[in-house]
Image: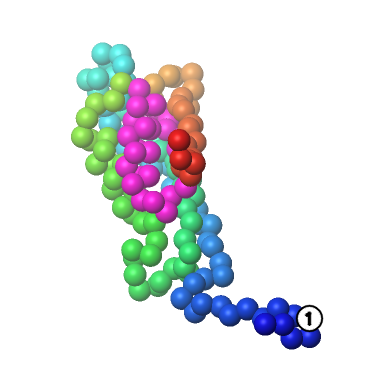
Amino acid sequence: MKKNNFKIIKIDKNKSLFNYEKKILIKDLTLDLKLGYYDFEKNKEQKVKFSLEIDYQDKKPTNDKDIKSIVNYGKIVKLITKLVKKQHYNFLETLAEDVFDELFKDKRIGKITLQIEKLEILKQCSSVGIQISKKRSHEKF
């Protein structure tokens, strides 16, 4: 329907006009764990630091009374803590892949940047580590 050269459209009340792009930040989660390829790393716990940026999208604003309406950073911290206690990892990269696998189970999450650092492994450095970004592919192969 046109009126005065304007097109009038009807908006469905159940659909949002907005998409929200949100980011969870977790900085410097420090855990003691056995991690590493060498024998001396397998026998002694070392301090390992995790930092994450988690991008996610939502079609609705956050419901202040429903914790399920957010990507819960508390659950993410618990998940990582539980994951690293479950098994020994030789490499930071394989640990990172397991973190990605768990977090991408939430379909709202589109991209994760994960940094993992060993804080006590080399005396000459305050830390050594990796940073990996992984993005959900929306293309079908």
- Which quadrant, please, contains the N terminus? bottom right
Circle count = 1
Q: Amino acid at mark 1?
A: Asn
Is 64 within the magenta? Answer: no
In the rendered structure, which segment of residues is drawn in magenta?
Answer: 91-118
Residue 40 locus on image (x, y percent) = 27, 15
Badge 1: how crowded within 10 Å, few (<14), some, or many (20+)? few
Single out the residue that lies furthest toward the right.
4
1 up-or-down from 81: above or below:
below
Q: Please tell me in which quadrant of the rendered image residue 84 appears.
A: top left
Residue 118 locus on image (x, y percent) = 40, 27
Q: Viewer-proximal residue, 83 or 121?
A: 83
Q: Which residue is mark 1?
A: 5
Residue at disc 1, secondary structure: loop
Residue 12 locus on image (x, y percent) = 51, 77
Q: Viewer-proximal residue, 43 or 5?
A: 5
22 up-or-down from 129: above or below:
below
